[in-house]
Amino acid sequence: MNRKADHPNTRSTYWRNLVLFALGTLLAGLALFFYGILPILYVNGRVHPPRQPVCCRSPMDWGMTYESIAFASADGTRIRGWYVPSRNGAAVILAHGIGGNRVSVLEQGMALAGEGFGVLLLDLRAHGESGGERITFGGEDIEAGAAYLTARPDVVRRRIGVLGISLGGLQAIQAAAATEAIAGIITDGAAANGFTDQPAPQQLGHWLDLPFEWVTFRLWAAWGVPAPLPVVEAIGKIAPRPVLLISGTHGDYEREMQRKFFRASGTGCTLWEVPEAGHTESWMKRKQEYAERMITFFTHALLG
């Protein structure tokens, strides 16, 4: 009788191959999920963020008189917001992060309004009460806001600034690069809009994240969100107008990306790092210092 199949070496080879096949299948499945399915779910959720209601607080809570306003962006999308008229001839546009709305930046806006600045609090497209079904990486909504302010009698020409948070920071950089009407910008955790903007990997986790980022940035266009200039190119076009980059450093990715933007910015740019803050947490962590730096920056940029 032939018992070759029962040889110990044959059995061990069979089980080794079976284990290797199972491990290979598991790794391939994980790669497909993390670098195929997960980017699709992520981008789909970000392109169409759930709208948060414009609710429960307004400039009236700070004793400020304001107007509900609306204007058209470049493609006709209706942008809505609040405007507190200027008392010093200068005005600042405030642009929230993804998933937020004008209420998200209300406290910063009221700190500026208290110093006499006009304050335009926007709902970016696909957010709050503004039109549009998907976000944009361009600065067209902020450019339209600058055009709206330019036409107002209480605002002196080119005394317009922007404070942008995350997505709003990305859009502020794009808008300032495109129009001289914006005299200075502050960004808090400005987002990237392309693979070129990513910081160099420094840890194993960063290397493993690279394929996810590469796939994600290629999916944005497929979902109707084309990328304008990379931030590292756009920010250099703003100089010598002043730019203040605010960065939480409680996380390598945030810190290194904002430093990359700073190195690409040219003259007129300042970087303020808040060690205990994560992404866009600097206002919560250092509210008084944040307000003082913000007011000082716009005083110099718009009134100096």
Image: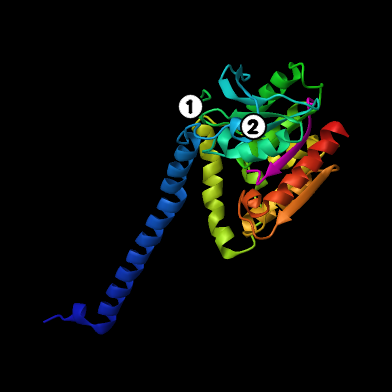
Q: In terms of secondary structure, where does tag 2 sit? A: loop
The amino acid type found where label 2 is placed reads Gly
Question: Looking at the picture, how far across and down is residue 192, in whole percent?
Answer: 63, 43
* Pointers 2 and 1 in contact (C-beta within 8 Å): no
Where residue 17 is drawn, which disc sits there? none
Residue range in magenta is 180-191
Q: Residues within 10 Å of mark 2 (few under 14, many from 20)?
A: few
> Residue 123's image quarter?
top right
Q: Which mark is residue 63?
A: 2
In this rendering, the label closer to the viewer, 2 or 1: 2
Q: Which residue appears farthest toward the right when viewing the image?
A: 304
Q: How far across and how far down the image is residue 271, in percent?
A: 77, 50
Q: Residue furthest front?
A: 63
In reply to whether residue 187 is colored magenta, the answer given is yes
Query: Does residue 293 lie above or below 55 as drawn?
Result: below
149 horizontally vs 56: left or right: right
Up-down relation of residue 40 to residue 158 (above or below)? below
Q: Residue 133's mark?
A: 1
Q: Amino acid at mark 1?
A: Glu
Q: Which quarter of the picture shows residue 82?
A: top right
Residue 255, given in percent of the width and then of the height, sits at 68, 55
Which quarter shows the N terminus?
bottom left
**In screen coordinates, is 254 left or right of 16?**
right
Query: How many numbered discs sit on the rendered protein?
Result: 2
Mark 1 neighbour class, 10 Å CA radius: few under 14, some 14 to 19, many 20 or more: few
